[in-house]
Image (cartoon, helix red, strand yellow):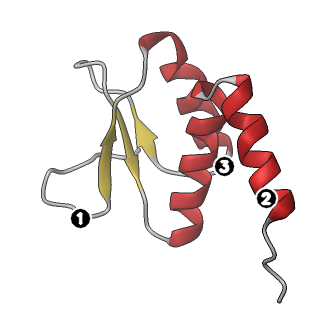
């Protein structure tokens, strides 16, 4: 079981609305990203790599972004010329 420590540089505390915290927690668990929800109501996530950071960001964005924010993000992805 994931037990965060305050001295671990890979531990980040993310402020998430209570209504979404457990859904995000369970999705991160499905992605094998160590996390826990302590009794103080926070969501503590261990990020050990750039891929894990991207997955955490994407998961949080999926649950918290508005429809318009997601559409804007998708549009930026489509217009970005990342292959040149």
Residue that badge 1 annotates: 9
Q: Name which of mark 3 and mark 2 comes first in the sequence.
A: 3
What distance separates the C-alpha of mark 1 from that of mark 3?
Answer: 21 Å
Which residue appears farthest toward the top when viewing the image? 19
Quadrant, the C terminus: bottom right
Tell me: 41 left or right of 23: left
Residue that badge 3 annotates: 31
Quadrant, the N terminus: top left
Residue 71 pos. (x, y %): 78, 36
Mark 3 vs mark 2: in front: 2
How busy is the neighbourhood of tag 1: few (under 14 within 10 Å), some, or many (20 plus)? few
Above or below: residue 47 compared with residue 18: below
Give whichever of 71, 49 is nearer the camera. 71
Q: Element under label 1? A: loop
Which residue appears farthest toward the left when viewing the image? 7
Q: Element under label 2? A: helix
Residue depicted at 47% across the width and 49% down the height:
34
How busy is the neighbourhood of tag 3: few (under 14 within 10 Å), some, or many (20 plus)? few
Above or below: residue 12 compared with residue 49: above
Q: Quadrant of residue 10?
A: bottom left
Residue 67 pos. (x, y %): 73, 24
Residue that badge 2 annotates: 77
């Amino acid at each position: 079981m994931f037990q965060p420590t305050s001295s671990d540089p890979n531990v980040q505390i993310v402020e998430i609305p209570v209504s979404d915290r457990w859904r995000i927690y369970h999705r991160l668990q499905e992605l094998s990203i160590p996390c826990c929800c302590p009794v103080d109501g926070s969501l503590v996530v261990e990020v050990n790599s750039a891929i894990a950071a991207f997955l955490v960001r994407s998961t949080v964005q999926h649950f918290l972004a508005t429809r318009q924010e997601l559409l804007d993000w998708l549009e930026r992805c489509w217009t970005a010329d990342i292959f040149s």
